[in-house]
Each structure stands twice: as C-alpha cells, then as structure tokens.
Image: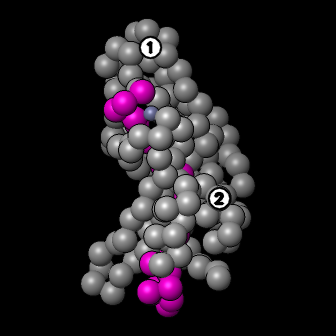
Amino acid sequence: MFASPRGRKQMGQLISLKCEKCGYEVNLGVGAGLTFNSLDTVLTLFDKPTQDKIKAAIEQYPRNFWYVSKEIGVCDKCGRISGVAVFKLNQENGQFIVYKAKCPCGAEVDIYDSEEVIEGKTKISCPPCGEPLEVTVNGHWD
Ligand SMILES: [Zn+2]
Ligand SMILES: [Zn+2]
C-alpha cells in the first residue's frame, strides 16, 4: 500500500519550543519522513486499537489519499508537549477521517498543526507558566 502525498514536503523538521520567562524547553521532530508513505512504518506510531481503525479506514476507502505526519501534541493531563502522529484520510465529501496517537502517558492530546506553529500563526502556551513559547527550526529529519 503506497499513498502519494501530492504537494506535501517529505521532510520532517526538528524544532525546539522555548519559554523565555521560565526556561522551559522541549525538542520535537514534526512533519513527515521519507518512510511515512509506508503503511507498515506509520502503523508502528499508533497503539493497537488505533492501528485497527486506520486499517479499517483504508480498507473502506482503498482509492483515497491518506497521509501521516507528526504534529505537536499538548497533553492536558501530564502537561507534556510531544511529537504526535496524526493519520488523515481524505473522503469524497472533502471531509477527513482523522486518528491521532496518544501522549506517552496514555492520555488524549490537543493537536497543534506544526506548520502553523513554525510560521507563528499559532502559539503554544508554556506548560509550567503559560507564556507563549518561541519556536526555532534546528534542522531536518527523513
Ligand atoms: Zn514558561
Ligand atoms: Zn500526557
């Protein structure tokens, strides 16, 4: 199974989010790597129940375009910011089927679009102090 991600950059970005007020800092890998076209590879980023849902969605819509990228997940429960895999499958009606991975603590996360955060359109609040975090792109991964 191979899905061609038309128009999407097949390169992940290494970013850091920093708080100038309290010194909080986190480094993340976001975006999509070269191997993210492979279903077997991307399935490993999700837990078993989510893997089953993804497989079912692809079986239901075998001709549809899907992709996986890592976005920025913020956990309400433990306060952690992590790179969280998000699966999207394009339906005929223009809607997406979306499944996201969980925080390492097992809780659901709020997803922030990594490109919007990098462009400064969306700000993430510092978990300890609430200040908007500054984003820096440090490099790429593939
Ligand atoms: Zn802070
Ligand atoms: Zn958590």
Quickly name the residue at label 2. 44
Q: Position of residue 3 (x, y in %)?
A: 59, 79
Q: Tag 1: residue type?
A: Glu
Q: Position of residue 9 (x, y in %)?
A: 58, 63
Q: Magenta segment, which residues?
A: 57-78
| In this picture, residue 118 sits left or right of residue 142 | left
Depth order, front residue of 62/49: 49
Q: Is residue 132 above or below residue 12?
A: above
| In this picture, residue 9 sits left or right of residue 134 | right
Q: Which residue is situated farthest in the top direction here?
A: 22
Q: Secondary structure at mark 1?
A: loop
Q: Is residue 32 above or below residue 95?
A: above
Would you say residue 7 is visible in this rendering?
no
Q: Which residue is situated farthest in the bottom direction here?
A: 63
Which of the marked residues, 1 or 2, is nearer the chain's N terminus? Answer: 1
Which mark is on residue 32?
none
Residue at horizontal 49 percent and vertical 62 percent from the top: 49
- Mark nearest the camera among 1 and 2 is 2
Q: Is mark 1 within 8 Å of ligand 1?
A: yes
Quickly name the residue at label 1. 20
Q: Position of residue 62 (x, y in %)?
A: 51, 89
The answer to whether residue 140 is magenta is no
Would you say residue 113 is visible in this rendering?
yes
